[in-house]
Image (spheres, rainbow, N blue to C red):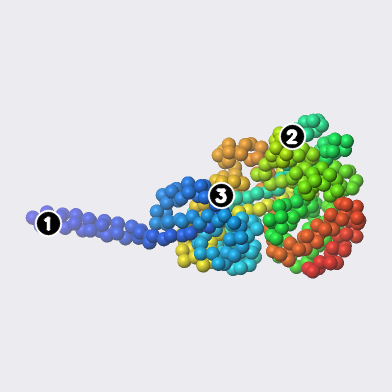
């Protein structure tokens, strides 16, 4: 009898212990929270598809989509009521200066499931300001060399390949140039005016300077002075300017306006099949502006000088400094960073180097994307107002050189003397 009682007591104790253990090990049910996610309206469908996947892992977090139609809403993020933003490149620096963003470095360091090494180092640099990550890079757009396959075929010029050099570039530009046919080997590019207040309006000279080992500032991210008169900068600008005034493989402003009367921008010259190459975004497409036959565009990484260098843009998943739900906001953007972006290039190696990305964009684009993000130097286009003003001063000097109005040494020396950061 006593033995039976003892067995029952032991069994009961084991059950109680097991139940107690289960109660101890069980995680408390998280409190339900709702976060607002501000994004451009053209991406709404993409995020609507991702929310159910997110809720499979975080059922307690409700994500409300706040679709933004006009970019002006992102210019005053300190006034926004949203918890999370999908920021386009021009708005990162203003948001940082406004104190509108929550630094995510502590979340990155505290989240063991977040693999920072999966990101390309250059991609992380694009979202890092003063040593702190202002968000997670979501998608990247990089400058590449676009070329017109039809013109290359017409003039019997081999297509450029990743790893090509400045000499290869000049040979290709010369091979495509046809002065009698009004075709140039290379068309200089400028950006749409909507970005002028955030980004340099003329892209081309910058990568050539940094590929040669030159520089415009003593430190790109934390500049204390300009270096327009750096010997390597002068050499790079001189080489670039000779494309116009010596080799005649690129049109002057007057020649560009003759090719396309609107404003002579490189985009229209290239799209109109009047130029063999131009620097463009990896995602850019070029339909014929006159409604005619679309060009057959190829792309390749920028030609390398002493170094490989590229300038890129990155959209950024960022958290509002005013959010009352920082942890839920972090879980949302960490999840988003693991998904394939709607457009542009993914910032994670695991996505960019995946079969899924290659199948989506094709082997050519995937190979160029990998080559660009493996560049030795990757610098962001967007910057604060003071530095942007100095770059525009540099561009004015380069333009004068390309137009034959001043020598390289004179123009860059004068620009350096006029600098407010010298």
Q: Quadrant of residue 352?
A: top right
The residue under the point 48% across, 46% down is 49
Q: Mark 2 points at which residue?
A: 149
Q: Quadrant of the N terminus?
A: bottom left
Q: Which of marks 3 and 2 is nearer the N terminus?
A: 3
Q: Earlier in the sequence, mark 1 or mark 3?
A: 1
Front residue of 37/290: it is 290
**Percent x, y for residue 115?**
54, 53
The residue under the point 50% across, 62% down is 83
**Percent x, y for residue 151?**
78, 34
The residue under the point 88% across, 54% down is 401
Do we see residue 353 in this rendering? yes
Give the Cα separation between the discs numbered 1 and 2.
91 Å
Front residue of 122/146: it is 146
The residue under the point 84% across, 64% down is 416
Mark 3 Cα-neighbour bin, 10 Å: few <14, some 14–19, many ≥20: few
Q: Residue 5 carries which label?
A: 1
Question: Which mark is nearer the camera, 1 or 2?
Answer: 2
CB-based contact (under 8 Å), mark 1 and mark 3: no
Mark 2 Cα-neighbour bin, 10 Å: few <14, some 14–19, many ≥20: some
Q: Mark 3 points at which residue?
A: 42
């Amino acid at each position: 009898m006593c033995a039976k009682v003892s067995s029952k007591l032991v069994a009961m104790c084991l059950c109680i212990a097991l139940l107690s253990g289960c109660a101890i090990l069980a995680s408390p049910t998280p409190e339900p929270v709702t976060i607002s996610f501000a994004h451009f309206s053209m991406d709404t469908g993409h995020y609507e598809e991702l929310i159910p996947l997110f809720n499979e892992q975080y059922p307690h977090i409700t994500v409300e989509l706040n679709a933004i139609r006009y970019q002006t809403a992102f210019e005053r993020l300190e006034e926004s009521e949203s918890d999370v933003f999908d920021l386009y490149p021009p708005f990162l620096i203003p948001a940082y200066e406004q104190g509108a963003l929550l630094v995510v470095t502590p979340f990155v360091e505290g989240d063991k499931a977040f693999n920072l090494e999966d990101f390309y180092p250059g991609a992380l640099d694009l979202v890092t300001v003063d040593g702190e990550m202002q968000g997670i890079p979501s998608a990247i757009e990089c400058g590449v060399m676009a070329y017109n396959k039809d013109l290359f075929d017409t003039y019997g010029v081999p297509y450029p390949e990743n790893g090509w050099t400045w000499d290869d570039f000049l040979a290709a530009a010369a091979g495509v140039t046809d002065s009698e046919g009004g075709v140039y080997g290379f068309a200089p590019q400028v950006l749409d005016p909507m970005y002028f207040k955030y980004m340099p309006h003329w892209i081309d000279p910058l990568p050539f300077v940094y590929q040669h080992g030159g520089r415009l500032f003593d430190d790109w991210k934390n500049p204390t002075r300009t270096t327009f008169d750096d010997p390597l900068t002068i050499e790079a600008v001189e080489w670039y300017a000779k494309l116009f005034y010596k080799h005649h493989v690129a049109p002057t402003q007057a020649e560009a306006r003759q090719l396309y009367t609107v404003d002579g921008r490189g985009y229209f010259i290239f799209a109109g099949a009047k130029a063999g190459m131009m620097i463009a975004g990896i995602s850019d497409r070029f339909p014929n502006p006159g409604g005619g036959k679309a060009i057959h565009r190829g792309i390749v990484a920028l030609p390398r000088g002493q170094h490989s260098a590229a300038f890129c843009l990155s959209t950024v998943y960022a958290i509002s400094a005013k959010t009352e739900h920082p942890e839920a906001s972090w879980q949302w953007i960490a999840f988003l960073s693991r998904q394939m972006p709607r457009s542009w290039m993914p910032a994670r190696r695991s996505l960019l180097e995946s079969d899924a990305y290659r199948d989506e964009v094709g082997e050519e684009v995937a190979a160029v994307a990998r080559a660009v993000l493996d560049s030795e130097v990757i610098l962001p286009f967007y910057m604060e107002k003071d530095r942007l003003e100095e770059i525009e001063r540099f561009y004015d000097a380069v333009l004068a050189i390309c137009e034959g109005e001043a020598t390289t040494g004179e123009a860059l020396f004068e620009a350096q003397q006029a600098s407010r950061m010298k």
